[in-house]
Image (tube, grey):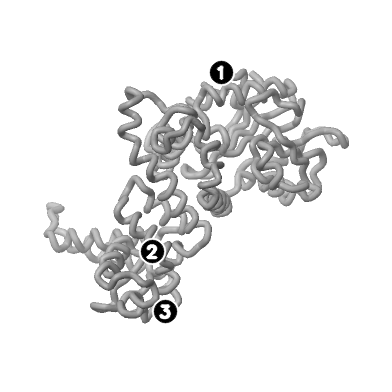
Amino acid sequence: MDSHASVNALLERITSAASTLPADGSLEPETRRELQDIVKELGFALETPLDTLNRFNFLSKPFQYAVVRVAVDLGLFEYLLEAGPDGKMLGELVTETGVDEVLLPRLLRTLATVGLLSQIEEHRWRATPLAVSCVIPTIKSGLKFLFDFVGPVFQKLPESLAKSHYRCPTALQGPLQDTYDTKLSGYDYIMDPRWVDTLKDCNLFMKGRRDGSTSWLEFYPFSERILADAEHDARAVTVVDVGGGLGHGLLEIKDKYPDMKGRLVLQDLPNTIEQAGDGQGVFEPTAHDFFTPQPVKGSKAYLMRQVLHDWPDRECQVILRHLAAAMRPGYSKLLVNEIIIPEVGASDFIVGCDLVMMGLGGGMERTESHWTSLLASAGLRIEKIWTWDDRTESVMEAVLA
């Protein structure tokens, strides 16, 4: 059954069950359980791969997440997906995975409770459509990174917050430092050679998140707001992507606007710039630490995508003041592509992002009022905000105040 048909069938079951409810709204235990099961199935049917990953986040169901992590290591989802709808007998899975015959059913039963497996008969199991999420490379990397590196940080969170007398963590003092007994920031610490595989998982996971979300260029009118009055001589810089990683953001801009004029400059730390190569003839890779003065003056746009949420306010003020000093009054714009937390009714996804930022480096997601105040403290003023939906990073366009 395809996803659309499955959703419709489940909605019909809900309607049918609801039609039998007594007028006073009371529920018999059996009816209550039936409705709960249908709603749970409906949630599974509506999930995207990223939704599945978010549902397994370490804060929600750690024991179930631990079993999912074990299954990833065993390649269990691959075995069962290859078997198709008939699934496999327990004995076959014991042989293929090498797992103890008493232990394996305990793991399989746990995976069934989160919708990844289905028990066809007493000793036969098959993968559900949701299991496909767990073999997608970016999702597998996310499962490993969040469990292996982020998970222990949140185990330490209560102790760390109590130790700080319940003050916001900073870049150099927080749950990560207490967990791993380091004085380094999270972004320096994960560069340690012992975390090389975890860093690869982190980078692949973040790439998957970007690829799986709506591009900011789909809802921000870049041509109208930036290109329309940008200078077009050969030396003019149109965009500086500050902390732009490997340059994917600039490649995306050039791909969408192939006839645009002006230089594109990528800035990041030296080890990242080395990986960015020669810029593919599109952008100029430049090593730069954004805690130091901005060397490119008077660009039409300075772009910061999902950078400022990594840092507490104090560090953000330093970064922003350097950018403000480089901006040309009446011409330059700062584009900040970040999540904006609703003042009321934040989703579990946004709350989870905020807590991860807090735990790993003292960073945070921010409300509109917080962003307004932060930018104002650096001499900047938000002119307008564009948002796709309440789970998408917004684009804040700021100018010199």
- Give SS at disc 2: helix
Q: Tell me what residue is drawn at x 59 percent, y 31 percent.
A: 384
Mark 3 = which residue? 83
Q: Quadrant of the C terminus?
A: top right
Q: Tell me where residue 180 appears, x and y as whole percent.
A: 42, 38
Mark 1 = which residue? 377
Q: Amino acid at mark 2?
A: Ala
Q: Residue 316, which numbered label?
A: none
- In this view, 171 is above or below 391: above
Mark closer to the chain start, 2 or 3 = 2
| The one of 197 and 35 positioned closer to us in this rendering | 197
Q: Quadrant of residue 260?
A: top right
Q: Tell me what residue is drawn at x 37 percent, y 81 percent.
A: 86
Circle 1 or circle 2, nearest the eye: 2
Q: Amino acid at mark 1?
A: Ser
Mark 2 = which residue? 71
Q: CA distance from mark 3 to mark 1?
A: 59 Å
Residue 253 appears left or right of 175? right
Q: Tell me what residue is drawn at x 51 percent, y 24 percent.
A: 313
| The one of 272 and 384 positioned closer to us in this rendering | 272
Number of residues whose C-alpha sits closer than 10 Å to that of mark 3, classed few (under 14), some (14–19) or many (20 or more):
some
Q: Amino acid at mark 3?
A: Ala
Question: Is residue 209 among the parts visible in the rendering?
Answer: no
Say how many tags the image has.
Answer: 3
Circle 3 or circle 1, nearest the eye: 3
Q: Quadrant of the N terminus?
A: bottom left
Number of residues whose C-alpha sits closer than 10 Å to that of mark 1, classed few (under 14), some (14–19) or many (20 or more):
some
Q: Tell me what residue is drawn at x 61 percent, y 25 percent.
A: 319
Residue 96 appears left or right of 395? left
- Give SS at disc 3: helix
